[in-house]
Amino acid sequence: MRRPALVVLVLAVLLTGAPAVARAGVATPPAGPAALAGIRTPGTAWEHDPATGRLTVTADDTVRGSELAALRRTAARAGAVLRHEPGRLRTLIAAGQAIYGGGGRCSLG
């Protein structure tokens, strides 16, 4: 197996966790990253924080009212931390653009 494919496989397993079985009287575990995959609210971003092992959902000042309430519910269901970022989030890079780090070059994909 090629190294990049192996890395993707390991990350997928780590981010999704083991499947959970719901039982009567036992709290349902968080839905995990899959719950965040459906977020399409402008002014939001989400990421996995390797330092804490938790997912973080970030919302900017444009997310308010019912959108913010729905985002809170989704973050709670995913076991994620909801964070507010003042100002407005915007995309500064585009697909295929070069990214440099750690002495190497990669493309955003």
Image (cartoon, helix red, strand yellow):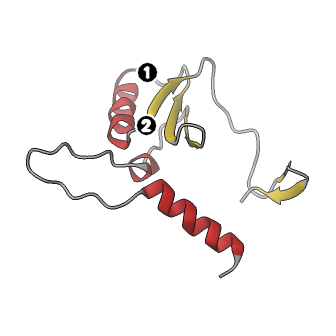
Horizontally, residue 103 falls left or right of residue 79, namely: right
Which residue appears farthest toward the right when viewing the image?
A: 103
Label for residue 38? none
Local crowd size for mark 1, using a 10 Å CA cut-off: few (<14), some (14–19), many (≥20): few
Quadrant of the snapshot with the C terminus: bottom right
- Badge 2 marks a residue whose secondary structure is loop
82 relative to 78, above or below? above
For the residue marked with disc 1, what is the amino acid? Arg
Could you give the CA–CA distance between mark 2 and mark 1, rounded to whole angstroms? 18 Å
x and y percentages locating residue 82 in the rendered image: 46, 29
What residue sits right under mark 1 in the picture? 64
59 relative to 107, above or below? above
**Image quarter of residue 16:** bottom left
Q: Sequence order check: which comes first, mark 2 or mark 1?
A: 1
Q: Nearest the camera: 55 or 73?
A: 55
x and y percentages locating residue 14 in the rendered image: 50, 57
What residue sits right under mark 2 in the picture? 80
x and y percentages locating residue 4 in the rendered image: 69, 70
Q: Nearest the camera: 44 or 6?
A: 6
Horizontally, residue 94 falls left or right of residue 105, namely: left
77 relative to 100, above or below? above
x and y percentages locating residue 67 in the rendered image: 39, 29
Frontmost of labels 2 and 1 is: 2
- Badge 1 marks a residue whose secondary structure is loop
Quadrant of the snapshot with the N terminus: bottom right
Local crowd size for mark 2, using a 10 Å CA cut-off: few (<14), some (14–19), many (≥20): many
